[in-house]
Amino acid sequence: MSPLKSDNSALAALGIHVAYGNTRVLHDIYCHFPATSVTAIMGPSGCGKSTFVKVLNRTLELTLNARVESGSVLFHDRDIYGDNEDPLEVRKRIGIIHQRPIIFPMSVAENVLFGARFHRQIVGMKPREYAEMYIDQVGLLDEVKDRLDNLASELSGGQQQRLCLARTLAINPEIILMDEPCSAIDPIATERIEELIATLRDSYTIIIVTHNMSQAKRISNQAVFMFAGRIIEAGDRDTMFSNPQTELAQRFIQGSIG
């Protein structure tokens, strides 16, 4: 089955090849991601899911010896890897939530404000109100309203992950990338993250890497299956799970590989 295509693409990867040192890890990746929708990227460990999602907002280049050898990523008809593109601006408009919460050594409120201050997003509001608005958007305000000045490291893992999401939302991205955001948190915290994704999907384009097929089935509109650095199959969620078109995808969904 051909890679996911859409007439309403928010982002498109075209002919992406990636290498770590002399080892190529992604091979000729083509994929379009529909706007205001959730796309799940699935596949066994080591297949290139996380590498691919980091390509989509130029965070991969922060990894030693990693490079995009060829190809382009189109966002508003511009290649984010073009010579005149600012990677910081790319990462502002295409935010990312990592596998484990990345918490700065500062207060809960200041964690949310960090990126917003850098990108000069706080206009017409007091910083505290701005922080509270996004903390509330991720359903965290009632839990931490008396601890906004406490170190963010004092929060639970699930709370920290939602705080990271609040920090990302506070810089007003158009696209949110999530690299296995629930792999290091408990089932209750996972449920809250999934509820947030369902709320955000109407306003943002969300691309989530997940090793959990049940989660992908619950939250996504589209699914992409990767294996050995290639996209094997992509399409709407229901078709992918009920009638996969390739043997590899069928075996993965049945649990015989992965």
Image (tube, rainbow, N blue to C red):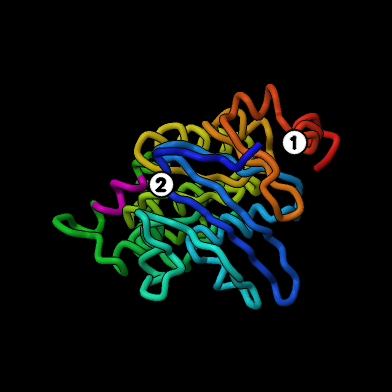
Q: Of 197 and 47, which appears nearest the observer?
A: 47
Rendered residue at 63%/60% (across/down): 51
In the image, the segment drawn in magenta is 130-135
Rendered position, 86 above or below 31: below
**Amino acid type of the residue that numbered disc 2 sits on in the rendered structure:** Ala
Q: Quadrant of the N terminus?
A: top right
Q: Is residue 179 above or below residue 201?
A: below
Label 2 Cα neighbours within 10 Å, binned few <14 / some 14-19 / many ≥20: many
Q: What label does residue 249 carry, if any?
A: 1
The residue beneath circle 2 is 10
Which percent across, then down, holds residue 207? Answer: 51, 45
Q: Residue at x 57, y 55 (%)?
A: 53
| Mark 2 / mark 1, whichever is N-terminal | 2
Q: Position of residue 121 (x, y in %)?
A: 25, 60
Residue at image x 50%, y 62%?
A: 72
**Rounded to the nearest whole Å, what is the CA distance between mark 2 and mark 1?**
25 Å
Q: Name the side, left or right, on which 188 lies relative to 144.
A: right
Q: Which mark is residue 216?
A: none
